[in-house]
Amino acid sequence: MRSDPAGYELVAPESLQAVVLLLAAEPGEWLPIAGGTDVMVQYAAGTLSARKLVSLWNLPELRRIEVFDNEVRIGAGCTYTDIQRHEVLRREFPLLTTAARWTGGIANQNRGTLAGNIVNASPAADSLPALLVYEAELILVSARGERRARYVDFHTGYKKTQLAPDELIRTVCLSRQFVRYLSNARKVGARNAQAISKVCIAALGRVDQGVVEDIRIAVGSVAPVPLRLLQTERVVKGQRIDHHLVLRAKQSAVEEIRPIDDIRSTAAYRAAVSGNLVAEFLEKLAGSVSEA
Ligand SMILES: Cc1cc2nc3c(=O)[nH]c(=O)nc-3n(C[C@H](O)[C@H](O)[C@H](O)COP(=O)(O)OP(=O)(O)OC[C@H]3O[C@@H](n4cnc5c(N)ncnc54)[C@H](O)[C@@H]3O)c2cc1C
């Protein structure tokens, strides 16, 4: 442990309102800490610059999953375990519950939260491609009030977000419109569990009378931010899936991503795998038609 606990202050207010008032009083001074699975890694490494931490752990306002007719609202402090256990999420948002199952080990899933994954803003984060394809919206809260923002706009660059210094994520909203979609999630890493992705994909699609009516594809670890492959979606949408379309989609996916070489993989490998994962999804989608 390279940090000295005596150099840090930690407070744990009992309500969300008390937390936002604290953030408003000294914007940028207090770092929210939820499960701590990212923050404590920085603390242990001696790289945590914030000295004042405000805990969000167990704030009841952030731990609810509420089901409405049109959307499911996931409290920002819900853990991966909460998400995996929720029946409606498992049934209607399997890309998210699958990503939750992949994220670290059991201990990590019991502490790590969805909002922590979003704000930590790693391009390799496993749950973020799912939020992109489900077109999630975020409810952000501060002492100034609440605002609703599209998740797709949240990451403004590598590890940069739209969050103001006095703001928190309060809720992640998922529209309940994907029940009839085929979905596919894949994580390619050194191992299936306990490994950071070299590439991960979340994809949704719907085919009507042999034609791709809607398709959404997002990938992680291949750009400074999690990326929705909008150009590739346009190539496929409205078409019948055949060998030529699969090749065009693979090519398009490789054009859209911006992978790099790093300690986990190479740009060339990431590009090849991304193309293959897109092809794999399209083949499944085509299979779902012939099986129907
Ligand atoms: C052993 C290990 C394995 C891991 N494996 C994976 C993996 O496989 N895949 C993966 O994607 N990640 C993985 N992680 C990373 C981590 O678990 C996730 O990013 C997790 O979701 C972070 O959530 P947290 O609640 O612990 O965040 P914290 O560490 O508490 O906070 C992270 C950041 O989010 C901010 N924050 C938290 N909640 C809010 C909020 N409501 N509003 C505003 N800001 C907030 C904090 O200020 C901080 O900047 C792993 C981590 C460890 C230690």
Image (cartoon, grey):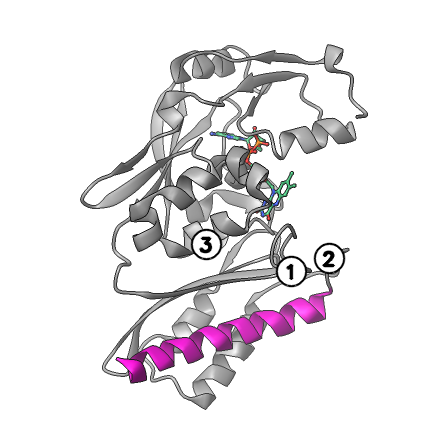
Question: In the image, residue 89 lies at what x, y percent?
Answer: 33, 48
Where is mark 2, residue-wise? 264
User: Where is the C terminus found, in terms of image quarters?
Assistant: bottom left
Is residue 161 shown to the viewer in this render? no
Which element type, helix, strand or loop, lies under badge 2?
loop
Residue type marked 2: Arg
Left or right: 251, with 214 as reference point: right
Disc 1 secondary structure class: loop
The one nearer the camera, 135 or 292, is 292
Q: Which residues are magenta?
A: 266-292
Please state the quadrant of the image where ligand 1 appears.
Answer: top right
Whether residue 183 is situated above or below residue 97 in the rendered picture:
below
| Image x and y of residue 30, in percent | 58, 17
Beta carbon at label 1 within 8 Å of ligand 1: yes
- In the image, 107 versus 159, the foreground residue is 107
* Quadrant in which residue 211 is drawn: bottom left
State the residue lying farthest toward the front: 106
Quarter of the image with the N terminus is top right
Label 1 close to label 2 by CB (< 8 Å) = yes
Magenta stretch encompasses residue 289: yes
Q: Depth-wise, is mark 3 or mark 2 nearer the camera? A: 3
